[in-house]
Image (tube, helix red, strand yellow):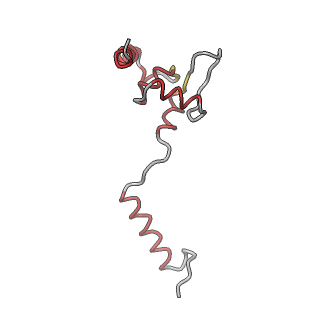
Amino acid sequence: MEEHNLYSKLEELINQKGIYQKNVLTLQEAAIYCGRSTSNLYKLTSAGIIPHSKPEGKIIYIAREKLEEWMLKNPIKTVGEIEQEAATLVTLNNTGRGGAKRC
């Protein structure tokens, strides 16, 4: 069976089971949940990048909370956030509390 067809069938089955309400996901469910291929997710778990469990040494389980934490790592700041930080630093430097000395 093609990976795309398998992916579609798994997605359908998991949605029926309420994947978004489960606390612990299998590797296949986790792949669908985060929109990656099963093989890509397997490589990430094998490399120790995504925390997971293998209670009997075969089936990989991933805590949904840990998967979400991994998905949200390394956030990119918005332009507004960067501008706010810059304004705060300028204000601190002008009041003499920023640590930088003026000439």
Q: Residue furthest top?
A: 1
Q: Residue at x 38, y 15 (%)?
A: 6
Residue 61: which quarter of the image?
top right
Q: Position of residue 23 (x, y in %)?
A: 51, 24
- Expressed as whole percent of the image width and height from the top left, the position of residue 77 reads 42, 54
Seen in the picture, residue 89 relative to 2 is either above or below; the reply is: below
Name the foreground residue: 20 vs 70: 70
x 59%, y 33%: residue: 47
Quadrant where the image shows the N terminus? top left
Residue 3 x %, y %:
39, 18
Q: Nearer the viewer, residue 53 or 7?
A: 7
In the image, residue 87 sits, relative to residue 15, either above or below, namely: below
In this rendering, position of residue 8 left or right of residue 55: left
The spot of residue 40 in percent (x, y) is 48, 29
Q: Residue furthest bottom?
A: 103
The residue at the far front in this view is 2
Which residue does the image show at 53% across and 84% down from the upper left? Answer: 102
